[in-house]
Each structure stands twice: as C-alpha cells, then as structure tokens.
Image: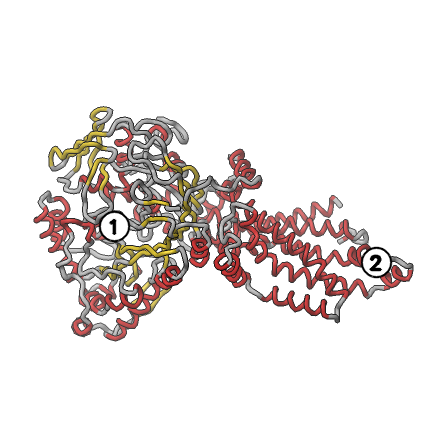
Amino acid sequence: MLDYLAKRALGGLVTIIIVVTAVFFATRLSGNAVEFMLPPGSDPAVQAALAAHYGLDQSIWMQFVRYIQGMFVGDFGISLNERRSVLLIFAERLPNTILLFSYALALAVVIGVPLGIIAALDRKGPAGSSIMTLAFVGYATPNFVLAILMILVFSFQLHWLPSSGASSPLHFLMPAVVLSLPMLAEIVRFTRNAMLDVLAQDYLRTARAKGLSERVVIGKHALRNAAVPVVTIIGLQVAGMVARCVLVEAIFATKGVGDLIVFATIGRDYPVLQFGVILIAVLVVVVSLIVDLLYAVIDPRVKVAAT
Amino acid sequence: MTKSVLLALGAALFGTTALAAAEITIGTQNMSSYVDPGRDHSNVGSQNYVNAFDPLIQKDYTQAGAIFSPGLATEWEQTSPTTMEVTLREGVKFHDGSEMTAEDVVFSFHRIIDELTPEYKSIKTQFFGNFAKVEALDTYKVLFTTHKPEPLFEILLNAQQGYIVPKNYIMGLTGDPAVAEIADFEAFALKPVGTGPYQITAFQPGENLTYARFDDYYGDKAPLDGFEMRRIAEMATRLTALANGEVEIITNVPPDQLATIESTPNLRVEGAVTPLFHVVIFNAMNPKLADSRIRRALSLAIDRDLLNEALWLGEAVVPSSHTYAQFGELYMPELDTFEYDPEKAKALLAEAGYDGSPIRFDTDAVYYTNGLLAAQAIKEMWATVGVNMELNVTNEWGDLANLETRNWSNPMYFADPAGSYGTMWAPGGARIGNTWQPNAAYEGMWDRFRYSTDVAERKAAYAEIMAYVKEEAPVLPLYQPYESYGVSTKVEWKPLPGHIPYVLDFRAGSIAVTE
C-alpha cells in the first residue's frame, strides 16, 4: 500500500513539475505583462523601469530559476496587478470557490444519485425516460445561458434572489444550481449505467432468491457495487472544480479563483496565472489519488497495491 | 506572511466575507487593483479618490469653469511667477488620527517630483514636471517653487495627483520607518489613508472598495454613513443588481441599455458628456503614414457627426478643436482644427500618391464603449475615399514603432489644455517621439502657451498649436462620449460637470438618499 502511494506521489510530482515548467514559459509567450501594469500607452521609459523593478527585464531562464527557488520556500511571487502575495490573494478567494463548488456538488450528488437509480429501475417506464431526457437537456444547456435566464427570472422579474456577490449563503444559491446542473446530469447518467450493469448480475438474483427485501437488494448489494464508476465521475468533477467555476463566477460575481485566473490571463499577471494552473494540477493529482484509494474502501476486491 | 494567509483563509471560510454594511452600493464595471491618488491617472481609478482625499485647493464642481475655494489650504498667494506660498488649515486629521502638517504636503509632492517609484515618474511628466521643489516654511506654511513661470498653480494644486497623503503612516508601513521605500507605497496603495469626508475601511483589489463616514472631517460632514463600490463586470448582471435593489447606482451603461433602465420602475438614467475624447491616432513616424497629406485625408474622411448620431444617439459632443468647456478662459470652440471633407480627403490622397495599400487600424473589442463599432464605421468611411482599412481587433497595445492607426482616449487630467492635449502632445509628452515628431518651432509655441502668465498670449499660442496640428494631423478627437449611469429613484445623484471623467462624488451637497 505504502509502495503504491509512493509511486503515485512520485508520478504526481513529475506531472506538477512538467506543468510548472510549461505554464511558466507559456505565460511569457503570451505578451508583455508591464503593458498591463500601467494605463494604456504609458511612457516606454516608465515601463522599462517597472520591468526592472519586478525582474521582468532578466533573461527568461534567470526568471525561471528565481521562480523555482521561491517555490521551495513557499514564495509564489507577487501579483503584478495587485502587487501583493499571490498566496494571500488565493487565500482570500479560494474559500468562495470551495463553498460554491461544495453546494453545487452536494446538490448534484443528493439529487443525481437517486434519480440515476430511479432511471435504472424504471428503465423503460415514464419516470426513467423523463429523467434521462432532463439529464440530456441539463447536460446540453450551456451554464451561461441558464445563468442569465435564472437572473432574469429570479432577480430581475421576481426579485427573490440576489444576482451577484458572495456575502451570504443565499448569494450562492443560483450559481450553485447553475453549476450543479451539468454535474447532476453526468451523475444521473453514470449512476443509471452502473446500476443497469449491476442489476443484470447473478449475485443480485441470488440476493432476491434468498428473500432479501428490495430495499436491501438495491441499497446494499446493487448500489455499493455501482458506486465505483460514480465515485470516479465525482472525482473528475472535483478535479475540474476551478475550470467549471470560471464562467459562473464571472456572471454572478462571486469572487472566486476561476474569475481571478481569467482576469490574470487577460492582464498577463504571470505569478497569479502560474499559481492558478499549479493549483489546478495539484488538485487533479491529489483527487485522482484519493479516488483510487476510495475504490479499495468501497470495493474490497480492489487491491490498490496491485493496480 | 503565513499568518496573514491563514487569517485571510480563516476569515473567508468562517463567514466573515460579508463586507461592512454600506448605506448605498455602486455596481462598477471595473475596480482598481490599487488606491493611491498620486500614482493613478487611469479612468477606473478616478472613481476612488474624491471622497477619501483632499487637495490643497478645492473648486466648485457643480460647474464646468474653475472657481477655486479653500481645501487643505486656507490661503495661497503666488509670490512670483515661479513661487506659490500656501497656508495650511490647522487641525486637519488623517483617517489614522494623525494631524496633517506641512511635512505631509512636502512628502506628497516630493514622492512624485523625486520619482520614488516608476509610476510617480510618469505622473511627474504629466502633471508636475515644472515643479522644482516644495518646502515647509513652518508647520502650516509651504512654499512651491517651479523651474519656469507657472500659470497653472491653482489647477495643479487641485488635481487628484496632488491630494495630500500622510508621510509618517506611509513610511512606517514596511521596512525602515525613516526611509520611503517602494514597498511602503505599494502597501499604502492597499491600505490608503487620506483626509476626506469618508475613510476607506475595506479594499479587495479588483473587487470592492468600502468607505465609511469620517467623523473627524474638518468640513461638511459626509451625507452617507458609508458606501461600497463593487465590481460587477457583466453588464446584464450589473443592470439586474440595480433592478433588484442590490445596488443603487451602476456605472458604464452603454447606450443600447438606456431604454431598459428608463422603462424599469424605480430606476432612471443620469449622464453627462465626459471631459474625455475618444481619439484616432495616426502614427506619423510609421513610413506608411509619414506624409501628412495621407494623415489629413484619413482624418477628413471621418464623419464624426454621423458616428455621434448612430452610436451615441446624438448625445456625445463632437469637438471642432482639442478643447473642453472645463478649460474656462482657455475654452476655444471657435477653432476649426478638425473637419469632415471627403472630397478634400480624396484630393489629398491623390496628391500624396497613395497606392491603395491597406492601413491597419488597431482596436480592442471592448475597452472603449462603442470602440469597435466606431472602427467598423470608420472602415466604411475610409473605403468611400479609396482607403483600404485592415481592421485589427486586439487587446495588445504593442510596440508603438509598428503602430499605424488606432483608437485611444485622451482624458482631461486637469482643467487646462496642458492637462489634456498636453499630456499626450506636449514636448516630452507620451506620444511625442514615438507617434509624432513635431518641428523645431513647436517647442517654442508650446512654451509660450504653457508658461505664459498672460491669458491672451496663452490663447494665441494654443491657436497656433492647433493650426499646426490641423496641418500635421497626428490625432483626431472623435467625440466626448456621453457617460451614462443607472440610478435608483431613492438616490438623488448625478455626475458633476466640474470633475475629471468618471468621478463618483458623494460629498456633502452631491448626493441624498430619499428613502
């Protein structure tokens, strides 16, 4: 087990090193950062002085070495736009993204898993068909379209919900619903398919033959075995948290890291952009590892050390 | 550092992200990443300063002209063409509780004059290039000395960049409290302190800025308990927040949204023509546009009145020259520097032997309201005189050496031609030497205009400069845009004509909440 963990951790580290290197050079190819630190068309001499102050006039290799050195002591640099620690900026905003995503994921799981089970159990019935139709609609609807529609109905027309901000749980309701819909649709589809596979297995017929109630057959025997692919898809969604939040955060102005990364990209704020991409990479690596470990917990037949 | 990161993380996770209650909230399109009046001349920054800082000399902002009144200075006297003696108001408190003295005034100006950061160097060039030194004569007396005669002392001492900031507070923010370091100014820009009727209580760069009434303010007390400026970048969300009662004022409303606001109960539109020109720059230093006849032709081919009717519903102002009503005696609408004459444009192109090669026009897709639409219309106007425009939509401002033509803005930084035309086109200005190199006589014209203390002589020199600009065509001001705000009917507020562009003035007499 420990051997497996060490191997996976090493693999994750290599992935992160590749990401750090790629993002460092890619951001610098995207344009001149100093141009965005000053009002448009500022004096070239002032731009040069500012570049020198932030070490942006050094060779790209020297900048890379300095960046890596800083990383080892937990220094991810200063935002060129806000002129303060990148870590501090992310620390302020990450909680909003985590909150928003947690609400959305909870909604998606709490509603999506039961709907997926119902859709499997009533595969050819009206309930199953309706759920799958809704799931496909949910999956196919771009979240910015739904966001604008919800704002128009619940804020502009009915005045029931705030349209922007992050100062109370109510502010997260609409963005969480919008964010949850495609995740919910995916969970419904995967739960249904996994359940259909399991429902066809001999051991379920055996369970029923033993006289177990349908609740125990489905809840204990079928669902547990169907959980592995569902956990995988939830894991993938958590890994993609930041990317999924970008548009929703921009529309509802919930002040999260997705929004931050978009503006850092537009404004060539290299240190913020670099840390954002590294954060996403770390998230993907860590969540993948956790999901693998969860397999063993859910299904004792899976021996992680052997995989 | 680790501690502050953990504190920020904890504060956000445990539900203290809610900002302090504000009496009104303003939904803004953009929010600055720093707040320092001396470092800033951006359009978005103009929103931040007037409520929390004071100049030495105040003015009546309810009218376009210049009527000055005491601010942090109670008296001022120009003792010679190059010196101004200022007597400070006693007992003025900064928001950190310290008293404002002559030391603070000297520090506020010398951080810029001495170029203590690269950005201050830029501000010095555009505002205080003529200032040689600022000295404290005693605790409440300051002497300003300039290199050349200075006719604009009052105007410059009223400018945002000359707002007074606290010396000891700033120098004590980082490192050695006896030394003004760059890090001090960067820390100040995140925790700003002024003397104004509101103090800044919270600032999240790029997101929101919160103000509360400062009870120790020396002048008329602030009419609001406080207010919050919150960035809501999306227009649809900003408008909804206004309709939903989440915010009371929204900024940067494009013309096509005005009817929606007007037709929504409890909302109205307020607006004003802004002292800012959207301009087209013609790079005279690019070989393709080196012949002034081609630049003049491009300028003469643009029907600015049509652009105004089509894009601004006729509410913008199309100028006859580079001049604003705010210039007072220097306002010169009688000059005919910029005209529309497509026939003359065709003749000039033929005379110059224009070979039909494409001329690139750079524009950002969204940076200027109607910027892209105007560029597309100009493309058609140029086509009618035989010029082939290559429209290049980009968010890069790029290397000026490669620039051919592009849109830009030329705001009024202070109420004089030197504070608008001059910021770009004075000798040593931002565009001189990179998109236009005027002749040797130009510097003499400029010096007569800029440093003469006789108004008639200044006007004559400026007319001469404009005549030269007409021949050279380095720039064409398209129009002064009509800037619109969406406002809740429970708030009585409108932009005041005496301010520079985009100022949100909530001082005594400028705003009232009726319910």
Disc 1 designates what residue? B497
**On screen, residue A165 above or below B55:** below
Q: Position of residue A65 (x, y in %)?
A: 49, 44
The chain under label 1 reads B
Q: Classify 10 Å Cα crowding around label 1: few (below 14), some (14-19), many (20 and above).
A: many
- Give the amino acid type for the residue marked by disc 1 in the picture: Pro
The chain under label 2 reads A
Disc 2 designates what residue? A217
Q: Is residue B262 visible?
A: yes
Q: Position of residue B358 (x, y in %)?
A: 30, 71
**On screen, residue A204 above or below B37:** below
> Which type of secondary structure does the marked residue at label 1 adopt?
loop
- Give the amino acid type for the residue marked by disc 2 in the picture: Val
Q: Position of residue B192 (x, y in %)?
A: 38, 37
* Residue at x 67% of width, y 55% of height: A109
Residue ranking furthest to the front = B515
Res B222 quadrant in image: top left
Q: Classify 10 Å Cα crowding around label 2: few (below 14), some (14-19), many (20 and above).
A: some
